[in-house]
Image (spheres, rainbow, N blue to C red):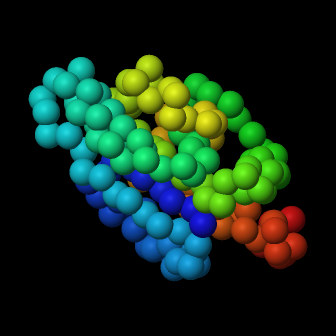
Amino acid sequence: MYKIIFFADSYKHFESAIKEYEKRLWKSIEIIKLKPSKKKDEISIIDDETNILNEKLKDISWYKILLYITWEIFSTEKLSQIIEDKKQNFWNIIFIIGGAYWINIEKLKNMIDLKLSFSPMTFPHSMAYLILLEQIYRIEMIKKWSSYHH
């Protein structure tokens, strides 16, 4: 099973595509959509959202993958291999997408197992969520030897 935790107000620009992948993955995915902090300054927002993530993650023994722009980039095939390897020790995988100002990684670094980037480019959070859903679906299709991934 996969779990995705992310901060988002809306993803209306990508809603139909997101809904399609959520429908395709419904048996194997749990979505936890968190409301972004309403604080006014960047530091307070980062602290607030980091604390929220800390509370959500502290008692979870799943394999945790944090998405961020400057970390490791893998091909889909490599990510699929990593996930399949990790599923031998961790039944479940959790992906985390931080808020608009990101998070305080120092406060969460001991909870994170893998830091992953899709690209050095910046994407809206809703697009990153859509990309993540598509990649999870693709990974599932790789496992089934589907023609979806060729």
From the viewer's perspective, is 4 left or right of 148?
left
> As rendered, which of 44 and 121 lies closer to the eye?
44
Identified at 66% across, 60% down, the residue is 91
Q: Position of residue 140 (x, y in %)?
A: 72, 68
Q: Is residue 55 above or below residue 107?
A: below
In the rendered view, does 27 fall on the left or right side of 4? right
The residue drawn where x is 87% and y is 73% is: 145
Q: Position of residue 59 (x, y in %)?
A: 43, 47
Q: Could you tell me residue 93's position as x and y percent?
A: 60, 55
Q: Name the residue nearer the viewer: 97 or 56.
A: 56
Inspect this view and state whether residue 89 appears: yes
**Residue at the spot 72% in from the left edge and 56% down from the top edge:** 87
Residue 17 visible, this angle: no
Which quadrant does the N terminus fall into?
A: bottom right
Q: How many marks?
A: 0
Instruction: Describe residue 146's horizontal placement relative to residue 51 as left or right.
Output: right
Q: Position of residue 68 (x, y in %)?
A: 53, 33
For the C terminus, the quadrant is bottom right
Quarter-of-image position of residue 40: top left
Give the residue at x 80% y 51%.
85
Q: Nearer the viewer, residue 148 or 44?
A: 44
